[in-house]
């Protein structure tokens, strides 16, 4: 199984809008981090859909190792 590229060893803070869908990059290759730009095409990775349930700031995983994907769980602190 291929490992995703670490985009950064920190989360990406994003203010999300209630009801809006966000496509989180799972491969780590997107130039539009933390969101998918299609760079995963031809790989085993697929983006993960996140639908905001309220307007607020959330932290998308940047290291691509979080157990709570697409959200950060602090795993980057152990890399």
Image (cartoon, helix red, strand yellow):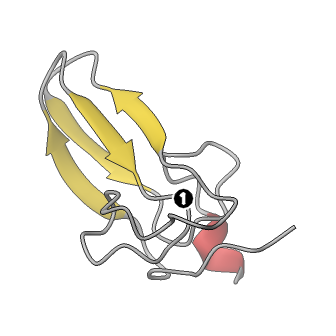
The quadrant of the rendering that contains the C terminus is: bottom right
Residue at horizontal 19 percent and vertical 15 percent from the top:
19
Q: Residues within 10 Å of mark 1 (few under 14, many from 20)?
A: many
Residue where numbered disc 1 is placed = 26
Q: Quadrant of residue 3?
A: bottom right
- 77 lies left or right of 18: right
Residue at horizontal 64 percent and vertical 67 percent from the top:
43
**Image spot of residue 15 (x, y percent):** 14, 44
In this view, the residue in front, 66 or 2, is 2
In this view, the residue in front, 39 or 57, is 39
The quadrant of the rendering that contains the N terminus is: bottom right
**Residue 29 to residue 56: above or below:** below
**Image spot of residue 61 (x, y percent):** 47, 59
Q: Quadrant of residue 39?
A: bottom left
- 33 lies left or right of 26: left
**Residue 35 to residue 58: above or below:** below
**Residue 6 to residue 45: above or below:** below
């Amino acid at each position: 199984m291929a490992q995703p590229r670490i985009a950064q060893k920190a989360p990406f803070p994003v203010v999300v809008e209630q009801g809006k869908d966000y496509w989180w990059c799972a491969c780590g290759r997107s130039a539009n981090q933390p969101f998918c730009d299609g760079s995963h095409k031809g790989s085993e990775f697929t983006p993960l859909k996140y639908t905001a349930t309220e307007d607020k700031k959330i932290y998308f995983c940047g290291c691509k190792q979080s157990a709570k994907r697409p959200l950060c769980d602090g795993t980057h602190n152990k890399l």
